[in-house]
Amino acid sequence: MPAGLRDLAGGHPDPGLLPVLTPPARVEPVPGSHRASPRLAALEDAARAWLARDGVPTDAVTFAHGALDCIARLLSTELRPGDAVAVEDPGFHHLLDLVTALGLRMLPVAVDDDGIRPEALRSALRAGARALVCSPRGQSPLGARFTPDRRDELLLVLGDFPDTLVVEDDHNADIAGADAVTLTSGDLPRWAHVRTVSKHLGIDLRWAALACDAATLARHDGRMLLTSGWVSHILQATVADLLADPEVTRLVAGAARTYAVRRDALGAALGERGIASHGRSGLNVWVPVRDESAVVNGLRTRGWWIAAGTRFRIASPPGVRVTTATLTPAEATSLADDFAEVLADSQAVYGG
């Protein structure tokens, strides 16, 4: 990022809303090999309670080194190079890069404010997608979240394709600003729900909880045993302590409210100026535009650094992503004014 610009491109949480990370003073050694006891009981119990609270089945739970690490292992054990994966479009750019790096083909699934669209999902599955990766809330970059009606519509589609591995990436979790409406409540044969703490407890906590069906668990853990073996018990103890701390719980709840205020402030300010945007949950707002470069460069000259949408898109129309995690309501007003000027100057607004 060029010096002197206000960074609204990164997608990261506000450091001021994260708890202080304090590793445990001591971690009791586990008798024998960590491979035989890869999960600390305290964290496994906490993870089960956390997931069950939102209706995620917890018969089979394990851990990984973050969401993308987990998803990479799930896809690489389930699929073979050349297989197709249904992905959100626009979607999380690191996931799109990961799918390509694994030698898999991406089949785009259109997204609106309520998440992936049922008719687009059906088209991708008919075209041969063997897996689906989607976000139930806090979707990046659009900020979509599942509603109960949308979940039910998607489950009807998935019911016609029972061999599909459905992977939910709940990376925003407790600061998404939306309830966890999950496809895993629909008795799917093959499923995985991945949940992390990096957005609300700290981006350096490379840990994820995975709830899934028994076959998926066996494949995931079998592959992990051949590589890293387990997640550091020191890291696990740190996460367990944070999840058990009532002060941290209150901090996270307050952070979720703050993020919602900041996100909604930008959406409202843009709307007052006739600029359409998306952002029902999470840390980002997506603004459809006609010319991404014109908007990004125009805002750069006015002191703002935002993300061009091209890295998030496969076949969807252009747009730009604004991370609102640190954006105050007063700044949102100024940014919306500058957006209006840039769009008027360049005639870059999508559909204008």
Image (cartoon, rainbow, N blue to C red):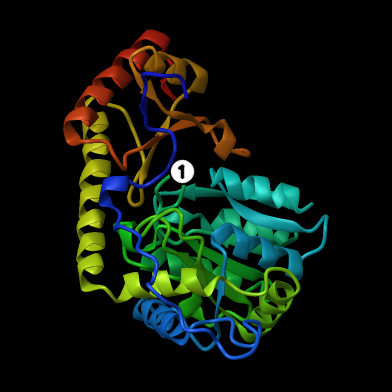
x, y percent for residue 299: 38, 18
Position of residue 319 relative to residue 67, above or below, is above
Instruction: Identify the residue under disc 1.
Output: 141
x, y percent for residue 230: 62, 74
Q: Secondary structure at mark 1?
A: loop
Q: From where the camera sits, is residue 127 visible?
A: no
Residue visible at 32% across and 39% down? 324
Q: Quadrant of the C terminus?
A: top left
Q: Nearer the viewer, residue 184 or 53?
A: 53
Asked where in the image residue 81 lies, by quadrant, the reply is bottom right
Q: Nearer the viewer, residue 36 or 8?
A: 36
Q: Residues within 10 Å of mark 1 (few under 14, many from 20)?
A: many
Residue visible at 39% across and 48% down? 143
Position of residue 24 relative to residue 334, above or below, is below
Residue visible at 54% across and 62% down? 66
Q: Nearer the viewer, residue 49 or 126?
A: 49
Residue visible at 27% across and 24% down? 335
Residue situated furthest right in the rendering: 81
Position of residue 83 relative to residue 51, above or below, is above
212 relative to 332 in the view: left or right: right
166 relative to 278 in the view: left or right: right
